[in-house]
Amino acid sequence: MIIITKPALEGQKILVSGASGLLGRSLVALLKQHKAHVTQLARKHSRSALNQQCDETVVIDLTTPSQATVDALEGFDAVIHLAGESIMGLWTDEKMTKIRNSRVQPTQVLAEALASTEKPPKTFICASAIGFYGEGGSAVLTETAPAGEGFLAEVCVAWEAACNLAKNAGIRVVNTRFGMILAPTGGGFKTMLTPFQLGIGGILGDGKQMMSWVHADDAVAAMVHAIITPALSGAVNVVSPNAVSNLAFTKTLGKVLNRPTVLPAPAFALKLLFGKLAEELLLPSQNVYPEQLQQSGFVFKFPELPSAFVNLLAQLRNRS
């Protein structure tokens, strides 16, 4: 849990989509610590999908532009758009269509509606991902690196471009390119933890590929930092400044858990099991550096992997 000594957003009205998701819940909690008034954007009324920490809920249709959507978006100081189909699971053609369509079209409708409000928000933060860079090899990838190739890169390029209508209207747009998010309640960390705890964790492929990761606490703190830092705009890499190889990642987790890491998963086997997901998510090397965050004075709470793992495991023990 992040402790706030001086609320920086007191009284501000902030709209969050994806408020009940992996990052959304932690983000809303942090915004509330900052004394912000938080409204969640929902596409339909459903108690199970709502975040009860939010002050209000507004139901908005992001499938097609409408005046009703514009009216519902009036009066916010900042909008944070996190909603989208999970990238986890087998990438069938249907799954890939859902991944793309859940990001690009809703973002474009939202950006257009925000641009049409009488008093647009000062800041629009839209999620993106380091999948933008594709296979990076050993190169250090800052925000100025070009887009890569592949499905995820294409989605991220279109996703970020969908924000242009808001940008052209004078709204400060921040595209937060998230790396692998380490959180105790879901995402990649929860998926990999069980095999490692059983002593059957191991490297993926040859283990040489670089992994760019971020602790969930730092990910949500970076979004708050983006709201209160006018100098930040455009692409912002939200990753630890210390990327590690898959081998180092594996050995570090095994050491923290005091478990062996001796069962590698060969690249061909991963491709047979997971198809394009393995090719674009598990095996590519992405040595991403958070240059914009570093230059703007953001301080990471968990810049190093061992302390991040220790904290996450402590949170899991406290929950049990």
Image: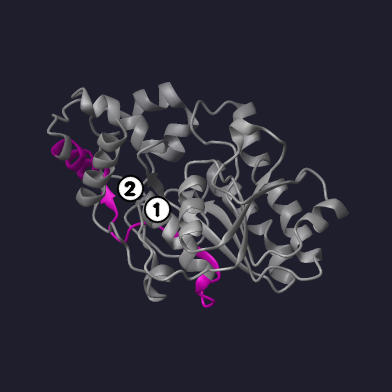
Q: Which one is in front in this view, the residue at disc 2 or the one at disc 1? A: 2
Q: Residue at x 73, y 54 (%)?
A: 110
Q: Along the horizontal axis of the image, is 222 left or right of 263?
A: right
Q: Given the image, on which type of amino acid does mark 2 rest?
A: Met
The answer to whether residue 82 of the structure is visible from this angle is yes
- Residue shown at 16% from the left, 40% from the top: 256
The circle on residue 136 is 1
Q: Which residue is mark 2?
A: 211
Q: Is residue 129 above or below residue 190?
A: below
Classify residue 111 by image quadrant.
bottom right
| Residue 157 x/y as whole percent | 60, 54
Residue 88 appears at what percent x and percent y?
48, 32
Judged left or right of residue 300, residue 248 is left
Report whether residue 129 is seen: no
Place of residue 127 in the rendered image (x, y in percent of width and height, measured from the top left): 55, 53
Residue 176 falls inside the magenta stretch: no
Between 47 and 112, the one nearer to me in the picture: 47
Q: Give the mark nearest the N terminus, 2 or 1.
A: 1
Name the mark on residue 165: none
Q: Amino acid at mark 1?
A: Gly
In what quadrant of the picture does the C terminus appear? top left
Of 315 and 234, the residue lying toward us: 315
Quadrant of res 52 = top right
